[in-house]
Image (cartoon, rainbow, N blue to C red):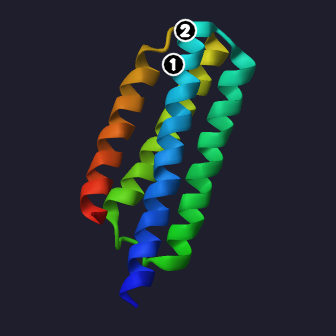
Amino acid sequence: MLGRIDHRKELLLQFSYECVFNAEQAIRGFSEFKNLSVSLQFMNQAFQCAKLAQYFYSQNYQRGEIQEFEDFVHQFGILNKEFLGSLQENSDLQWSYIELNNLENIFNELKTRLN
């Protein structure tokens, strides 16, 4: 049983890490290279990782069991909306970077909780 619990935590962290990594690649990539297509592909990967993690969580944990993860998913939604809105409005990515930083902070809290 203990091995299964540790494996669940590892998978949840892996999915969450992939989400952060891809979101960062999307934002930094667009900021540096202005490649919309590649940036959207990275954000799509981040979105898919977030949804996969959310599904995995719903199948393996009770709602409210790991609040840091639920905060993580909520923050990713904010980041995703902000980034896509910035691209649509052709505005700078200042708020996207702020929301990415918030996501990274919550991810670090999640890592601490699960380790």
Q: Is residue 6 left or right of residue 47?
A: left
When asked about the image quadrant of residue 36, the answer is: top right
- In this view, the residue in front, 44 or 99, is 44
Above or below residue 60? Residue 31 is above
The residue located at (65%, 23%) in the rendering is 39
Q: Eyeballing the image, is 61 above or below 73?
A: below
Label 1 Cα neighbours within 10 Å, binned few <14 / some 14-19 / many ≥20: some
Q: Which residue is mark 1?
A: 28
Look at the image and tell me in which quarter the N terminus lies: bottom left
Give me the residue at 59% from left, 15% from top. 30
The residue at 66%/17% (across/down) is 88
- Image quadrant in which the C terminus is located: bottom left
The structure residue drawn at horizontal position 54% and vertical position 9%, both measured from the top left corner, is: 32
Q: In the rendering, at what x and y percent does residue 77 appear?
A: 52, 43
Left or right for 99, reference 37 = left
> Residue 57 appears at what percent x and percent y?
50, 69
State the CA–CA distance, disc 1 to disc 2. 6 Å
Disc 1 residue type (three-letter): Arg
Which residue is most to the right?
A: 37
Image location (x, y in percent) of residue 92: 50, 9
The reply to whether callout 1 and callout 2 are in contact (CB within 8 Å) is yes
Q: Nearer the viewer, residue 20 or 55?
A: 20
- Extreme residue in the front direction: 3
Q: Residues within 10 Å of mark 2 (few under 14, many from 20)?
A: few
Residue 40 lies, in percent from the top left, at 69, 27
Q: Secondary structure at mark 1?
A: helix
Say which amino acid is labelled 2: Glu
Residue at the spot of label 2: 32
Q: Is residue 71 above or below residue 23?
A: below
Q: Look at the numbered disc 2 and give the secondary structure of its residue.
A: helix
